[in-house]
Amino acid sequence: MGRKRRAFSTEFKLEAIRRAGERRERGTALTVIARELGITADLLRRWTRELGDASPQAVASRQDLEAENRRLRRENEVLRQERDFAKKAAAYFAKEHR
């Protein structure tokens, strides 16, 4: 049985990035900082690359955009399915009418 994937809040990520920045200026290794936070150094690097110096408002805005994109993709898929069904129904009834 596999391990459960942990989820981290945006606030935790931003705080981890802030702490890492402060500690790195004093010469602390990123791996040490990550270990103290209970995460991997690769994860901390990825958060820094993705979120960087982003403010909480910028992060929230990006998350809102991503949520909107997911919603629109789902809606687009439903519309495609409805279109395909309408095509098949039209072809069926056109064949029956002849």
Image (cartoon, rainbow, N blue to C red):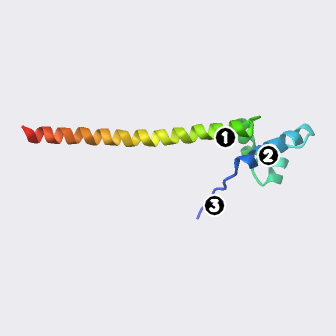
Task: Name the residue that disc number 1 marks.
Answer: 60
Task: Name the residue that disc number 2 marks.
Answer: 15
Task: Name the residue that disc number 3 marks.
Answer: 3
Question: In the image, 10: left or right of 79?
Answer: right
Find the residue positioned furthest to the right.
26
Give the residue type that dot 1 points to: Ala
Residue 31, numbered label: none
For disc 2, the neighbor class at 10 Å (few under 14, some 14 to 19, many from 20) is few
Contact? badges 2 and 1 (CB < 8 Å): no
Residue 85 position (above or below residue 53): below
Quadrant into which the N terminus falls: bottom right
Residue 40 position (above or below residue 56): below
Q: For numbered disc 1, what is the local secondary structure?
A: helix
What is the C-alpha distance between the residues marked 3 and 2?
A: 25 Å
Quadrant into which the C terminus falls: top left
Q: What is the total number of numbered labels drawn onto the structure image? A: 3
Find the residue positioned furthest to the left.
98
Give the label, 3 or 2, closer to the camera: 2
For disc 1, the neighbor class at 10 Å (few under 14, some 14 to 19, many from 20) is few
Pick the residue in front: 90 or 47: 90
Residue at image position (57%, 39%) is 66
Contact? badges 3 and 2 (CB < 8 Å): no
Pick the residue in front: 21 or 94: 94
Residue 84 position (above or below residue 40): above
Query: Sequence-wise, which precedes: disc 2 or disc 1?
Result: 2
What is the C-alpha distance between the residues marked 1 and 3?
A: 28 Å
Query: Percent x, y for residue 73?
Result: 46, 39
- Which of the 4 image quarters holds residue 92? top left
Give the residue type that dot 3 points to: Arg
